[in-house]
Amino acid sequence: MREGTDFARRLIDWQRRHGRHDLPWQHTTDPYRVWLSEIMLQQTQVATVVGYYARFLDRFPDLASLAAAPVEDVMALWSGLGYYARARNLHACARALMERHGGAFPRDPAAIAALPGIGRSTANAIAVFCFGARAPILDGNVKRLLCRSLGIEGFPGAPAVESRLWRDAAALLPAADVAAYIQAQMDMGATVCTRTRPRCDACPLADICVARREDRVAALPTPRPRKAVPERRATLLVLRAADRVLLEERPPAGIWGGLLSLPELPDEPDETAVAAYCEQRLGLRLVTVAPAPTFCHTFSHFRLHIRPLLCAVEALPQAMEPGLRWVERKDLARAALPAPVRKILSAIP
């Protein structure tokens, strides 16, 4: 590899000519907007984020409005974006900034990283784009770019490999134009040095890339060590009375934490067990039970096989346990529902 100044110069020149310049969170130094985009872009494609980003800013235009809102409103706007801990942390971070930092982001990357839901890479990105800091980032796109161009072997998530990547990322920082360089790394990973079918012919680092020279582009970065993906099963009860559906608030921790979901039974109980559960826990007497098609939803660490049961009940009970609520069908579009639950409900005639 040539010296770091040449590495950075190539990327900066490429970014100015070929990089992305029209994303809605660019051309701003407002840390609120940069932070929001960075959190939304974690594990999520740009094309998906754009619409959510606009709707979120329309509802919460600044830090104060986000901090003052009920977390349920935040979760409802995040519904369908996935990785819901991001939304809970976003709300907690806004409140922490209002309470501990006077409603403003600290300028120091380490102080930003101490806030809820903000890691080192995100903190550095905020500090670079908003406060002119000289700091590296290390998101998935940058890891891939560095592993290929420098020929770094080993799974990037392994502590030793990640530590080396941080050192190399810091060593390659230019003395000036850091924001353009950081943006170039992200743009390169997203549009040129992609996970599959990278466009090496369009890469400004092609002639100094170790992976290309050694014909190892497809092998780097080293994949995560493969493990068997656990399989789980759950039955979701679609309990209907008149034009209402019974929803249950999920616990704050765990999958779909804080969202509204359908009452869940583990595995695949028979109709007698379902009727007993509804009567004993919910005080509901079932009229009909009909299975809907089972489908699989994949999480980052397991696969969940979901079996919906469409259940009609006799009448609405006078009282329900905390966390349970009857929601009218017309209000479901605004409810904070995980994508698989929304899929089930949208298929009901």
Image: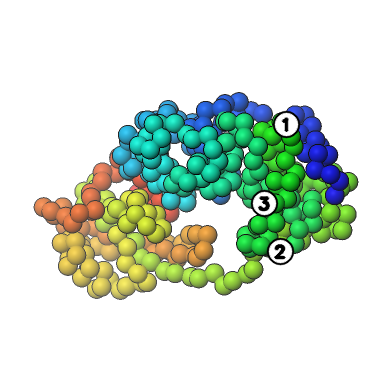
What residue does disc 3 label?
A: 166
Picture layout, residue 28 above or below residue 253? above
Residue under the point 66% across and 33% down = 179
Q: Residues within 10 Å of mark 3 (few under 14, many from 20)?
A: some
How many numbered discs, if any?
Answer: 3
- Is tag 1's residue or tag 3's residue first in the polypeptide sequence? 3
Q: Identify the residue at image location x=81%, y=39%.
A: 5
Between 2 and 246, the one lying in front of the other is 2
Horizontal and vertical percent for residue 175? 74, 34
State the SS at label 1.
loop
Task: Tell me which residue sits at (60%, 26%) in the image.
Answer: 27
| Label 2: few (<14), some (14–19) or many (≥20) C-alpha neighbours in 10 Å | some
Q: Which amino acid does label 2 sit on?
A: Gly
Residue 223 versus residue 341 in the image, above or below: below
In the visual, does 167 lie left or right of 260?
right
Residue 195 percent location from the top left of the image = 70, 52
Q: Residue 30 carries which label?
A: none
Q: Which residue is under mark 2?
A: 154
Q: Mark 1: few, some, or many residues within 10 Å (few <14, many ≥20)?
A: few
Marks 3 and 2, how far apart in space? 14 Å
Q: Nearer the viewer, mark 2 or mark 1?
A: 1
- Give the residue number, with chain letter if any, for mark 1: 176
